[in-house]
Image (tube, rainbow, N blue to C red):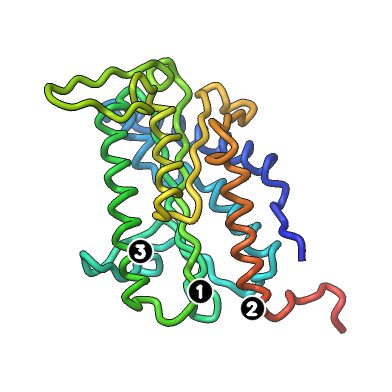
Amino acid sequence: MAIELADYENKAREAIKVFWGNRAAARQKQVEAGVIDQGERAGVTSGKNLDGFITLILDIVRANGLHAADVHLTKRLVTLPGYFRPTKQWDLLVIHQRRLVAAIELKSHVGPSFGNNFNNRTEEAIGTAADFKIAYREGAFGEQMAPFTGWLMVVEDAPESRSAVRDAMNYFQVFPEFKGASYQKRYEILCRKLMLESFYTAAAVITTPREAIEDGAYTELSQLTGLRTFLTAFAGHVATEAAQHPSPPPPSLFNT
């Protein structure tokens, strides 16, 4: 059957509105409580900034045939075995008939600090993927089709994230693609390389300005690392699982 993207464009715009709205609400709550917030910590720790994207992922799971799959978000239920460490908590897991269908990381990065935070996000993404890849090879999830692994990053579209960045080293040079690349471009390169090395099935980055709280505007930096490509790969994987291991049909409103 044809894959279904569940009206993703409109839902993605709504997700962006939720993203900025929740950040603003969390920051305002800190201000009203008289708490001094360093940088953007209030928005980061609010914990619900990417809920709109979770809803979109759930809709794609259901629309592509896995009506009975479990989509987990809570701490204990998103914990998977690792190879280099005992466990790793993912942001979202899709489980169907006790098989791991998908493991997805949903991340965001807003200013004013981009340098150190970019490095931290990069190291986390690489480490998580490498650990998972070997754990799967060693049979941590049993005999099954390789799960879909996804990494989705939402980056603030701001002058600091768009500006060229210089790197200085004494003896060696960075790879040419990184020379003068902005943090937005560096995330795009990261996503390309994560997929090239088969660290993730799909990796995507989208950018959005703070003003998007009104209209949900976002930008894809390339087709390969865009949201549509990410969701198409995910929907295809879900549809394949549904074809191989069908779920019972959803209850009909007209059953008698």
Q: Position of residue 38 (x, y in %)?
A: 25, 27
Q: Secondary structure at mark 3?
A: helix
In the figure, 45 relative to 139: above or below?
above
Disc 1 and disc 3: Cα gap in Å? Answer: 13 Å
Asked if labels 3 and 1 touch by Cβ distance under 8 angstroms, the answer is: no
Q: How many marks?
A: 3
| Amino acid residing under circle 2 | Gln
Q: Position of residue 94 (x, y in %)?
A: 51, 66
Q: Which residue is mark 2?
A: 244
Asked if labels 1 and 2 touch by Cβ distance under 8 angstroms, the answer is: yes
**Mark 2 neighbour class, 10 Å CA radius: few under 14, some 14 to 19, many 20 or more:** few
Between residue 8 and residue 162, name the one nearer to us. 162
Please state if 36 lies on the left or on the right of 192 as rendered.
left
| Amino acid residing under circle 1 | Met
Q: Position of residue 41 (x, y in %)?
A: 31, 34
In the figure, 107 relative to 232: above or below?
above
Q: Secondary structure at mark 1?
A: loop
Q: Position of residue 88 (x, y in %)?
A: 30, 62
Q: Which residue is mark 1?
A: 145
Disc 2 and disc 1: Cα gap in Å? Answer: 10 Å
Q: Secondary structure at mark 2?
A: helix
Q: Which residue is mark 3?
A: 133
